[in-house]
Amino acid sequence: MKIVVLDARPMAMERDAWAGLDRLGEVEVYPYTSPQEVRARTAGAAVLIPNKTPIRAELIESLPELRFITVIATGFDCVDVEAARRRGIPVSNVPEYGTVSVAQYVFALLLELCHHVARHAEAVGHGEWTRQPDFSLIKTPLIELAGKTMGIVGFGRIGQRVGELARAFGMTTVAYDPAPRSSPADDLVTLCDLDDLFARSDVISLHCPLTPETAGLVNRERLGRVKPGAFLINTARGPLVIEPDLAEALDAGRLAGAAVDVVSLEPIRLENPLLRARNCLITPHIAWATAEARARLLDATVANVASFLAGRPVNVVN
């Protein structure tokens, strides 16, 4: 049985890292697969393991031996899950590997917006503290989180963990979930609609999947509702945000700052307006990538394949 890993590079470059798959079939591991290469590399495959390589309906229909797809990620928008369902092909993801790491990273970004640690450290390194008479050098406004409101868009595992950390900082939490539950999973959070969340929150953190309904949910109209001094953080998916609208809101001062670990096209293009926007911190899609999270991700991906072959597929999203 042919098992194909289509884009291993972000996860693990070493072939030995994928050795757990070798007992399950004939394994081919590619660091990266371009659109021009995907058809040849997937030919004859029974199991496909993509990360971001698009697996669209035409490709699925062209692979008669394909039986299973498991995404090396939580998000599965790279796969046409409905096309797979029509063929009776289960699609699995890895839902929990990055919960702790991503939530931790949200606060790394937020604390940088509040304190600009890197900017102050650079100022010291450049001699600015030495050249002035005061015991304290303050380059930017410094912000305390206690008493502020954290608005969480998407209240799944990561959103709930972010809420726990926010409360540890003394913040109030409100949340919107695109797939609402009958009651919140966390009785210390207040559920509200999206427009209300944007109006009430001092910090808005995005944690929902990318779907046709959530694409562009951060737009000019909603950004016009935010309170002065608010921050936006996106560690979910870039297309949740209309980037020119966010850049405009930052430059106009409607938002005090933003921190994004994801953008609409990755790697980021030089023409992305966020690169020139006021007080916009951009990092290169690394919230998920702690050593601990990557180890969990790889182990869970192998387990997904093993469970499917045993006739008991797990983490199925379609």
Image (tube, helix red, strand yellow):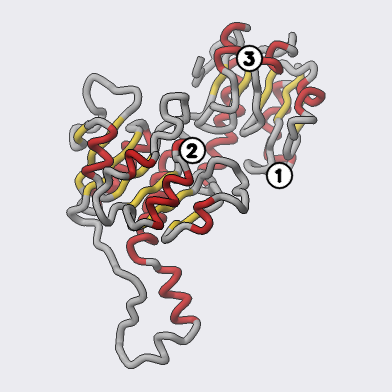
Q: Which residue is drawn at 25% across and 57% down?
A: 145
Where is residue 15? Give x, y as percent: 74, 40
How many circles with numbers are drawn on the protein?
3
Q: Inspect the image, locate mark 2, and give the three-letter code of the amino acid beneath it.
A: Arg
The residue beneath circle 2 is: 237
Q: Inspect the image, locate mark 1, and give the three-letter code of the amino acid beneath it.
A: Met
Q: Inspect the image, locate mark 3, and give the three-letter code of the amino acid beneath it.
A: Leu
Where is residue 85? Give x, y as percent: 57, 10
Determine if residue 22 is in view.
Answer: yes
Picture quarter with the N terminus: top right
Q: Residue at x 44, y 51 (%)?
A: 247
- Compared with 134, 165 (above or below) is above
| Callout 1 touching callout 3 (CB < 8 Å) | no
Q: Earlier in the sequence, mark 1 or mark 3?
A: 1
Q: What element carries label 2?
A: loop
Name the mark on residue 51. Answer: none
Name the mark on residue 309. Answer: 3
Nearest to the observer: residue 257 or residue 86: 257
Q: Residues within 10 Å of mark 1 (few under 14, many from 20)?
A: some
Q: Which of marks 3 and 2 is nearer the N terminus?
A: 2
Q: Toward which corner of the image does residue 299 lie, by quadrant? A: top right
Q: Is mark 1 on a helix, strand or loop?
A: loop
Measured in 3D between alpha carbons, the distance from the residue under mark 1 to the one under mark 2, in whole angstroms, is 24 Å
Q: Residue at x 39, y 55 (%)?
A: 250
Measured in 3D between alpha carbons, the distance from the residue under mark 3 to the one under mark 2, in whole angstroms, is 31 Å
Where is residue 178? Give x, y as percent: 34, 26
Determine if residue 104 is in view.
Answer: no
| Callout 3 touching callout 2 (CB < 8 Å) | no
